[in-house]
């Protein structure tokens, strides 16, 4: 597979790194000489210095035989023109552009087949807002991903000293089995420990500080969260802090929810505009790192403080300050993916990344097989892939225990019509089943070779 990536920002660099590690043919284009030098020194990819929307540069990069063009520069216009030029020069199978301007996203005619004809227009800010809203709706979770139109959930749960399971082996969670009713099942597909992903075995001991990744049917999610955390959490009071599109989008979402919400924003113009359209959310002008303002707004009574400004340093600082002053839980927007484990170590409960959201969306189109969705987790160290089992696949009509599957990957759920199956080794996969797979980065290539490629049968 040949992938051309236009733009060596956070998304472009990490996407190129992941794909080159999987032995894919990756070509990078950027107009910044320093960024191109960095790519040449650190990644096993081809790099071209130039404008990614230039027909000559795209031709030199080999657009004629590329499988995918991914345009992720900081300019929406450059991204769109690059895709337009690519489609005019050759029949490139897939074109993906990051587009942050909501006016472009809402104008479906521009993105339609008669004009730009994009396979995917990514708006990472919207994805971040959706993720934060899910975390508000499912308090107690530190990670949350939906599959199969919301029928299957993968939830990350951070365990402390009172959490259920701490000190027990996975095979000894008998209270959990007794708790489940109506043939419901859950499956611990992974454990994140010390920033490492573990695919657990029966004798794996669960420890304090672990993040359990649990796959389940959607209807039992809140009960399972309460069971593991031993807490009945509810989000009643929220402060959103920041002067960004994400802060405005998030305030708009909260405006229709039965939650006491405030928007703390330093920009007077944005405050005025938000005040005009928000009914329930109280808008406060001020510095998001000002402890006096936090004290005035009774930060100690806040269930969730969400820092989503354009400045990630301010997000981290204000979140840590809010936590120290008594906020029960804090979320910080972090742009640099490598900062995420550091930030959570410092005390931020949840770090969200628009760049990681963008990478997840792009991987959906890169993974082989009939892939429906992909979620990148833990700074890209793992992926969850939702795909369809076709009749030609050798994984169908046999017990899962008899399928030769990579050791660093696990089948977490099978969806058959309206039925969700959290499988054990004796369950079978049938043609047209949706299959949800959790895989460490080290197993992705083998998953593609042994499973995804065979699902397409070529």
Image (tube, helix red, strand yellow):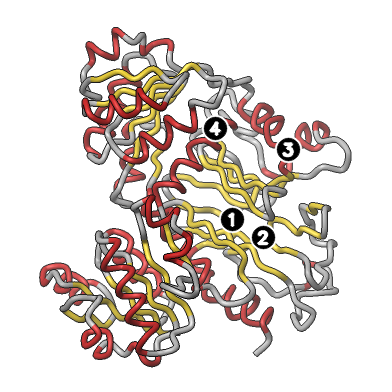
Q: Residue 379 location, x and y as percent? A: 40, 53
Say which mark, if any, is on residue 159: 4
Distance Cα–Cα, label 4 vs label 2: 24 Å
| Marks 2, 3: nearer the viewer | 2
Residue at 27% in and 77% down: 28
Q: Are marks 1 and 4 in contact (CB under 8 Å)?
A: no
- Give the label on residue 173, or none: 3
Position of 295 relative to 309 (above/below):
above
Q: Nearer the viewer, mark 4 or mark 3?
A: 4
Q: CA distance from mark 2 to mark 3?
A: 23 Å
Q: Nearer the viewer, mark 2 or mark 1?
A: 2
Q: Which residue is mark 1?
A: 199
Residue 445 on image: x %, y %: 52, 75
Quadrant of the frame with the N terminus: bottom left
Looking at the image, which residue sits at the far right?
182
Estimate the spatial distance between the alpha carbons at disc 1 and disc 3, rounded to whole Å.
Answer: 16 Å
Of labels 2 and 1, earlier in sequence is: 1
Q: Position of residue 141 (x, y in %)?
A: 55, 35
Q: Alpha-carbon distance for marks 2 and 1?
A: 15 Å
Closer to us: 312 or 107: 107
Among numbered discs 4 and 2, the one appearing first in the sequence:
4
Q: Which secondary structure lies at badge 2?
A: strand
Alpha carbon separation for disc pair 1 and 4: 17 Å
Q: Alpha carbon of mark 4 to alpha carbon of mark 3: how far?
A: 15 Å
């Amino acid at each position: 597979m040949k992938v051309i990536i236009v733009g060596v920002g956070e998304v472009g660099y990490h996407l190129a790194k992941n794909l080159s590690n999987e032995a894919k043919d990756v070509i990078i284009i950027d107009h910044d000489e320093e960024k191109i030098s960095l790519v040449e020194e650190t990644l096993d990819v081809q790099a071209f210095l130039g404008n990614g929307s230039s027909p000559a540069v795209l031709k030199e990069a080999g657009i004629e035989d590329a499988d995918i063009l991914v345009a992720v520069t900081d300019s929406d216009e450059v991204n769109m023109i690059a895709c337009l030029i690519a489609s005019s020069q050759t029949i490139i199978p897939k074109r993906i552009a990051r587009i942050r301007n909501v006016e472009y996203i809402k104008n479906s005619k521009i993105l339609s087949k008669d004009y730009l004809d994009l396979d995917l227009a990514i708006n990472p800010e919207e994805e971040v807002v959706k993720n934060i809203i899910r975390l508000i709706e499912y308090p107690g979770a530190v990670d949350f991903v939906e599959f199969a139109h919301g029928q299957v959930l993968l939830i990350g749960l951070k365990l402390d000293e009172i959490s259920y399971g701490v000190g027990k082996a996975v095979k000894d969670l008998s209270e959990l089995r007794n708790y489940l009713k109506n043939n419901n099942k859950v499956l611990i597909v992974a454990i994140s420990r010390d920033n490492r992903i573990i695919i657990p075995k029966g004798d794996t001991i669960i420890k304090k500080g672990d993040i359990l990744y649990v796959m389940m049917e959607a209807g039992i999610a809140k009960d399972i969260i309460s069971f593991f955390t031993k807490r009945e959490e509810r989000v009643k009071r929220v402060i959103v802090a920041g002067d960004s599109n994400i802060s405005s989008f998030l305030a708009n979402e909260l405006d229709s929810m039965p939650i006491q919400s405030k928007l703390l924003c330093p920009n007077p113009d944005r405050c005025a505009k938000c005040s005009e359209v928000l009914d329930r959310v109280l808008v406060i002008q001020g510095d998001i790192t000002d402890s006096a303002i936090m004290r005035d707004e009774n930060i100690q009574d806040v269930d969730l403080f969400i820092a989503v400004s354009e400045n990630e340093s301010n997000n981290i600082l204000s979140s840590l300050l809010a936590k120290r002053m008594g906020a029960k839980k804090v979320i910080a927007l972090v742009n640099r993916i490598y900062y995420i484990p550091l930030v959570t170590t410092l005390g931020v409960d949840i770090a969200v990344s628009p760049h990681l959201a963008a990478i997840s969306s792009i991987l959906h189109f890169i993974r082989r097989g009939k892939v429906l969705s992909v979620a990148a987790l833990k700074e890209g160290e793992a992926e969850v892939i939702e795909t369809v089992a076709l009749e030609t696949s050798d994984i169908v009509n046999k017990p899962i225990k008899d399928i030769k599957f990579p050791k660093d990957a696990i089948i977490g759920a099978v969806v058959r019509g309206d039925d969700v199956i959290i499988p054990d080794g004796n369950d079978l996969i049938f043609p047209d089943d949706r299959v949800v797979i959790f895989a460490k980065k080290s197993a992705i290539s083998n998953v593609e070779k042994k499973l995804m490629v065979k699902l397409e049968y070529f």
